[in-house]
Amino acid sequence: MKNILVTGGTGYIGSHTTVELIGQGFEVIIIDNLYNSEAEVIDRIHKITGIRPHLEVLDLCNQEKLDAFIKKHKDISAIIHFAAYKAVGESVNEPLKYYRNNLLSLINILGVMKLYGIPNLVFSSSCTVYGQPEKLPVTEDSPLQPATSPYGNTKQIGEVIIKDTTHSNENIKAISLRYFNPIGAHPSSLIGELPRGVPENLVPYLTQTGYGIREELKVFGNDYDTPDGSCIRDYLHVVDLAKAHVVAVKRLIENKNKKNYEVFNLGTGNGVSVLEAIRSFERVSGVKLKYRIVGRRPGDIEKIWADPSFANSELGWKTLSSLDEAMKTAWEWEKVVRSNKL
Ligand code: WQD
């Protein structure tokens, strides 16, 4: 049985990935500082899988503590590194907090990989590295644009740090996964996205509005150059996204990677507008959503969706869930969270 270290494993994508890894027979160790998640997520992973992964509450920026922990767990086959701050708006106001946390944690991870001979890394990157692409859908070869937020910049710099490390050290292999917009929750409704405070992202805002926690959803602009005027994104089910991590980790462990450092887009290949997402929500929930068109959100990309064909052919991975299916799980999760049924 292979041991996988999942950093940020109690978070949104990390918890879903842990469930999929356990389902595929991997042993998972989680490191998380619980900055934006709850230790109870471990109980729920246990409920879903019947297995309780070890949770080490540890800040990855603390090199000494990380070092001491890894020293005791030298049999780790791969690390999946999710742990990071991710609020775009906050990163603009507190850039140092973002650069320090997201980059130092990554550097420390790579440091222990080198020191203790851990050969494989899967890194959470983001479609944000493409900015507004000139050509759509966007392939992995599309030029990267200067980041529009410190958060986005930490993903770009993170990719460069990993690339340079794999080039200088042939014993370290890595895959960066550029996620488009993950939504939804596990079908058990035991894990899902739990934003603290007012959500920044569309789908949690939408489901909270549907539940009556928010008065109305503000649609940021309907004067874009898109068929209905609202922005277009590529929304993928978080369980599909989680499965891609298992495939990526296996590719590295089984030495099936073609280069020491590889990058994959993870999306459905379908562009969906904000207004289409609202209609999907209304269809699956039966709730009429209160929304209002307001001005554009500064920094928003007009339209982006993935060309996932490289991930389809090379990883043998593709998304299986439709927008409606993903949206339905987001709604079910919202209801469970709000009715205190967790
Ligand atoms: C989606 C669409 C909004 C809220 C995020 C991260 C980015 C990257 C991708 C991770 C946009 C509109 C939203 C609302 C709205 N992720 N919207 N009303 O903009 O793609 O970015 O995911 O690395 O870094 O920021 O996602 O969910 O915020 O917005 O109209 O209340 O919904 O304008 O068109 P986005 P999002």
Image: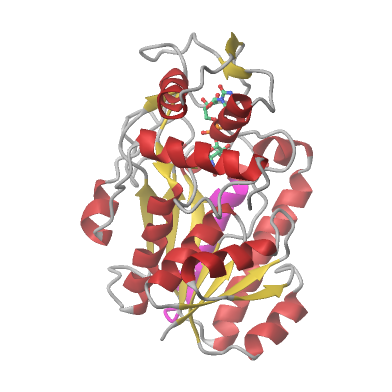
Query: Residue 147: horizontal and vertical position, in percent?
Result: 57, 38
Corner quadrant of residue 37 = bottom right
Of 45 and 83, the residue lying toward us: 45
Relative to 59, 190 lies left or right: left
Question: For the point 63% across and 53% down, which residue is it?
Answer: 342
Quarter of the view holding residue 314 = bottom left
Residue at image point 34% right, 65% down: 247
Residue 123, given in percent of the width and then of the height, sits at 50, 61
In magenta stretch: residue 55: no
Residue 263: name its quadrant: bottom left
| Image x and y of residue 28, in percent | 52, 76
> In this orientation, which residue lies closer to the viewer: 93 or 22?
22
| Count of numbered circles on the image | 0
Q: Is residue 332 above or below residue 10?
A: above
Residue 93, x across and y down, in percent: 78, 37
Determine if residue 105 is in view.
yes
Q: Residue at x 48, y 43 (%)?
A: 184
Q: Main secondary structure of the magenta part?
A: helix
Q: Is residue 262 left or right of residue 19?
A: left
Q: Nearer the viewer, residue 136 or 34?
A: 34
- Region rendered in magenta: 153-171
